[in-house]
Image: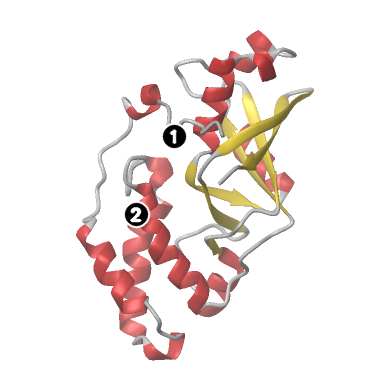
């Protein structure tokens, strides 16, 4: 089996430094492990939510947990999803992105032969790989892809029946305003993305993927 590359080395070169204490993750995991919501003091839940807000919610501002460290959040997110009784699978998920700066128009340059270009596939795999924000709304994905004035190629990733690490709906339901995700956000951990299909749709590219595990 061919294994996809992880985050592209050229992206990691420009990755920010993690700004939260990663040692706290083990403590948080131990607090959550095997517990039910009623077992965790309200004050403790608030402290955990605030840490995760700094670690996850501020990523787009280049704060929190960087790409190198991000998968360390997965065990904590999984325990939280169990505690709030979140969904563990969805029929379809979407992730809207723009291509990385090292080759911002790779798809425009190579389409319709992009699917046969190893460098383009590695670029796309890198953007789908790992612990990332997705959603079950195509429109939300497109907003993330199109929401910034840029000449970079815009991409809407699509995946069928992915396993969910953490979903936001029950998180909002049980934790109220102690949020650290966008409403409708799903956290997925794509371990080995394979590009199945690439289509151009007037102003963006739809990229269908499968996680080969």
Q: Residue furthest top?
A: 109
The residue to which callout 1 is attached is: 6
Q: Residue furthest right?
A: 202
Residue 99 against residue 65 in the figure, above or below:
above
Q: Is residue 108 visible?
A: yes
Task: List x then y, in percent, for residue 50.
Answer: 34, 66
- Front in this rendered view, residue 12 or 2: 2
- Front in this rendered view, residue 57 or 83: 83
Residue sitting at x 52%, y 60%:
165
- Which secondary structure, mark 2? helix
- Which secondary structure, mark 1? loop
Residue sitting at x 33%, y 70%:
29
Residues packed near mark 2 inside 10 Å, few (<14), some (14 to 19) or many (20 plus): some
Residue 157 sits in quarter: top right
Residue 155 against residue 22 in the figure, above or below:
above
Residue sitting at x 53%, y 71%:
171
The residue to which callout 2 is attached is: 72
Question: Marks 2/1: CA distance?
Answer: 15 Å
Task: List x then y, in percent, for residue 154.
Answer: 63, 27
């Amino acid at each position: 089996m061919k294994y996809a590359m992880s985050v592209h080395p050229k992206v990691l070169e420009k990755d920010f430094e993690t700004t939260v204490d990663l040692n706290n993750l083990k403590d948080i995991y131990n607090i959550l492990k095997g517990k039910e919501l009623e077992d965790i003091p309200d004050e403790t839940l608030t402290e955990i939510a605030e840490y995760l807000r700094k670690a996850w919610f501020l990523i787009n501002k280049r704060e929190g947990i960087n790409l190198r460290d991000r998968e360390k959040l997965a065990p904590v997110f999984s325990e939280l999803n169990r505690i709030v009784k979140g969904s563990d699978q969805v029929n379809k998920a979407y992730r809207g992105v723009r291509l990385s700066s090292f080759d911002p128009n790779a798809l425009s340059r190579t389409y319709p032969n992009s699917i046969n270009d190893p460098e383009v596939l590695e670029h796309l795999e890198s953007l789908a790989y790992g612990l990332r924000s997705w959603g079950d709304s195509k429109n939300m994905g497109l907003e993330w892809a199109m929401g910034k004035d840029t000449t970079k190629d815009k991409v809407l990733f699509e995946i069928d029946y992915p396993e969910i690490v953490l979903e936001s709906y029950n998180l909002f339901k049980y934790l109220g305003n102690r949020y650290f995700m966008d409403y409708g956000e799903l956290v997925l951990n794509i371990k080995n993305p394979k590009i199945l299909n690439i289509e151009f749709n007037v102003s963006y590219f739809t990229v269908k993927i499968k996680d080969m595990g």
